[in-house]
Amino acid sequence: MSNIDQAGTFILGDRSVKRLGYGAMQLAGKGVFGPPKDHDAAVAVLREAVAAGVDHIDTSDFYGPHVTNQIIREALHPYPEDLVIVTKIGAVRGDDGSWNPAFSANQLTQAVHDNLRNLGLDAMDVVNLRIMFDVHGPAEGSIEAPLTALAELQRKGLVRHIGLSNVTPTQVAEGQRIAKIVCVQNQYNLAHRQDDAMIDDLARDGIAYVPFFPLGGFSPLQSSILSDVAQRLDATPMQVALAWLLRRAPNILLIPGTSSVPHLRENLAAAELQLSDTVMTELEGVSGVLAD
């Protein structure tokens, strides 16, 4: 049994996946743009992840763009039968590396076909519609038009399941009236707790919540509370942050990313950490300290 099995499983679409997956964003170059600094290392990380039991990989064709999907195909195709690949659409990259909305039906259709081609798939397991009203975080606005376009691609058989990303609770509710939503992917971690209520609501409905930037993203989590707990548990602060997320709610699926095999192993070992109720209470203080 691999260590990630100890974290349990949760339903993603119609598949049961281990709760510790892998996010491919860091396989692209600096700023998630262009090729990786070490192509062979990127391939090695993907193969190590699958060998370790990871059965859920999160990617997007706008990572690079195209770079991460092409590396995933090179490293893993033909894919293991139990591997679920999730992508995001709704944005395109500018020549300067900028992140720009791409919401029209034609743009979304092109994005799905780009993902399928670069990954070497006939249909995507899960496609998350990334809402881009504000690049930096959720912002209100109707998602009916783009989600209806994605639902049409699902009807045609190009997409098996639909998720939402960078969304508000109002948009999740609107989305559920248009299509079956199997997951929500928003920013969430020990310090960034705006989705606490949403996570609990989704758990009651059996819907997966996939936090991006689970370790803080471009500004890694730093807290004396986190460091103190990690030292006592003989773990790294980032392992504790991942273990906290696994304990936080049963519907949380983790997709920490890395371009390093040793770092990958460190992330996956977080499943072995058992956090007591006392430690969980102590870690609750991280959000308040970092928010001040």
Image (cartoon, rainbow, N blue to C red):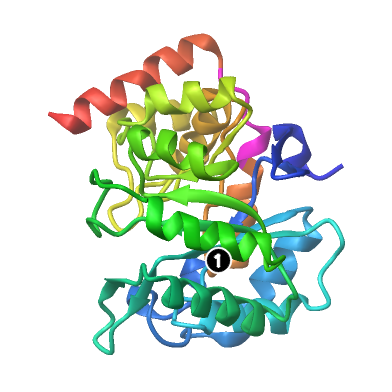
Name which residue lies at 37% across and 71% down. 104
Name which residue lies at 36% across and 44% down. 167
Q: Amino acid at mark 1?
A: Thr
Q: Residue furthest top?
A: 278
**Depth check: 223 or 89 in front?**
89
Q: Quadrant of the N terminus?
A: top right
Which of the 4 image quarters holds residue 4?
Answer: top right
Say whether residue 153 is magenta: no
Residue 41 can be seen, yes or no: no
Q: Position of residue 44 (x, y in %)?
A: 68, 75
Vertical placement of residue 270 versus 99, above or below: above
Q: Which range of residues does the magenta coloring cover?
A: 270-275
**Depth check: 146 or 286 in front?**
146
Q: Position of residue 214 (x, y in %)?
A: 44, 45
Q: Quadrant of the C terminus?
A: top left
Q: Position of residue 66 (x, y in %)?
A: 51, 83
Which of the 4 image quarters holds residue 20?
Answer: top right
Vertical placement of residue 15 versus 151, above or below: above
> Within 10 angstroms of label 1, few (less than 14), some, or many (20 or more) residues?
many
User: Is 77 left, or right, of 160 in this rendering?
Assistant: right
Name which residue lies at 47% across and 49% down. 164
User: Is 217 left, or right, of 201 in this rendering?
Assistant: left
Name which residue lies at 57% across and 86% down. 39
Q: Position of residue 161 (x, y in %)?
A: 65, 52
Determine the secondary structure under disc 1.
Answer: loop
Say whether residue 272 is magenta: yes
Q: Residue furthest left?
A: 292
**Depth check: 278 or 209 in front?**
209
Residue 266 can be seen, yes or no: yes
Vertical placement of residue 127 versus 91, above or below: above
Q: How many marks?
A: 1
Write down the residue under mark 1: 59
